[in-house]
Image (spheres, rainbow, N blue to C red):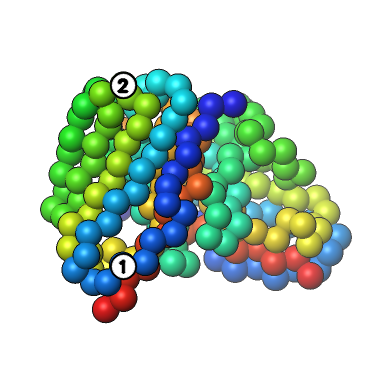
């Protein structure tokens, strides 16, 4: 079944560490997105991609970076994690009927 | 940039009561989408409205898009505990802007 997968589901990491959040989809969608969401709060777009080798920054400034080397893979990287990066990161694809979100990665930086 | 205001921010109801959340914009929207996020979960697409005055129903859920395409509402009839979660409206063309959401709690 076509789906979107995010790993890890939970991550606790120390300040200064480099981390990569994985997002993969088997739906064949060109358009992919990363949103940041603090618990119970609104979603903020931080990155998006409309296809291979295409990446753009979203409305919310973020120190993270993304890459899109393959259609199905859209990883997000933080070179040096800080406590202010603690949040939930949601990956999504755009299909015929709106967004399909992954289960998210809950990141805690200590 | 363009934004939508969603009200109320929180709503607590007794099971069986009705619930409505509203999404308002100062500018005309090309479309509006609604998502539901269960506690601890991720947003799930419910519906998209495109036409002025459009009304769509999904079982106990009724979605409306205003005649001026500046507001939308989601109404739940006879809430159940399974309706608990945060309901977000969102607009845009392939790059969505979300409202702040309405958090619904249901007392059994």
B85 lies above or below A43 = below
Q: Position of residue B59 (x, y in %)?
A: 13, 53
B72 lies above or below B80 = above
Q: Position of residue A76 (x, y in %)?
A: 65, 47
What residue lies at 81% left-to-right and 58% top-to-bottom?
A: A82
Question: Foreground: A81 or B30?
Answer: B30
The answer to whether A37 appears left or right of B24 in the picture is right
Quarter of the image with the C terminus of chain B in it? bottom left
Question: Foreground: B13 or B33?
Answer: B13
**Residue sticking out furthest to the right:** A16
What residue lies at 75% left-to-right and 50% top-to-bottom?
A: A78
What residue lies at 31% left-to-right and 76% top-to-bottom?
A: B107
* Distance from Cα at disc 1 to Cα at disc 2: 30 Å
Q: Which mark is residue B68?
A: 2
Question: Foreground: B53 or A57?
Answer: B53
What residue lies at 63% left-to-right and 33% top-to-bottom?
A: A58
- Report crowding for label 2: few under 14, some 14 to 19, many 20 or more residues within 10 A (C-alpha): few
Question: Foreground: B36 or A81?
Answer: B36
Label 2 SS? loop
Q: Which mark is residue A67?
A: none
Q: Earlier in the sequence, mark 1 or mark 2?
A: 1
**Which image quadrant for residue A56?**
top right
A85 lies above or below A92 = below
Q: Is residue A104 visible in the rendered structure shown here? A: yes
The answer to whether B7 appears left or right of B107 in the picture is right
Quarter of the image with the N terminus of chain B in it? top right
Q: Position of residue A26 (x, y in %)?
A: 40, 46
Q: Position of residue B21 (x, y in %)?
A: 34, 49
Q: Are marks 1 and 2 in contact (CB under 8 Å)?
A: no
- Report crowding for label 1: few under 14, some 14 to 19, many 20 or more residues within 10 A (C-alpha): some
Q: Is residue A29 visible in the rendered structure shown here? A: no
Instruction: Provide the residue designation for mark 1.
Output: B13
């Amino acid at each position: 079944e076509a789906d979107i997968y995010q790993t890890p589901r939970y991550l606790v990491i120390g300040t200064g560490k480099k981390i990569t959040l994985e997002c993969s989809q088997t739906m064949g969608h060109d358009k992919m997105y990363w949103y940041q969401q603090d618990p119970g709060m609104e979603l903020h777009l931080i990155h998006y991609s409309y296809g291979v080798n295409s990446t753009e920054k979203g409305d919310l400034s973020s120190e993270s970076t993304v890459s899109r080397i393959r259609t199905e893979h859209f990883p997000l990287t933080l070179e040096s994690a800080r406590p202010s990066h603690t949040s939930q990161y949601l990956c999504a694809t755009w299909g015929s009927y709106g967004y399909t979100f992954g289960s998210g990665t809950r990141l805690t930086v200590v | 940039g363009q934004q939508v205001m969603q009200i109320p921010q929180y709503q607590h109801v007794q099971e069986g009561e009705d619930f409505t959340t509203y999404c308002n914009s100062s500018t005309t929207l090309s479309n509006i989408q609604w998502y539901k996020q269960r506690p601890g979960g991720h947003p799930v697409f419910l519906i998209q409205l495109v036409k002025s005055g459009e009304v769509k129903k999904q079982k106990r859920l009724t979605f409306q898009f205003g005649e001026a395409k500046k507001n939308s509402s989601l109404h739940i009839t006879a809430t159940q505990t399974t309706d608990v979660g945060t309901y977000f409206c969102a607009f845009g063309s392939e790059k969505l802007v979300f409202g702040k959401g309405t958090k619904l709690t249901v007392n059994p």
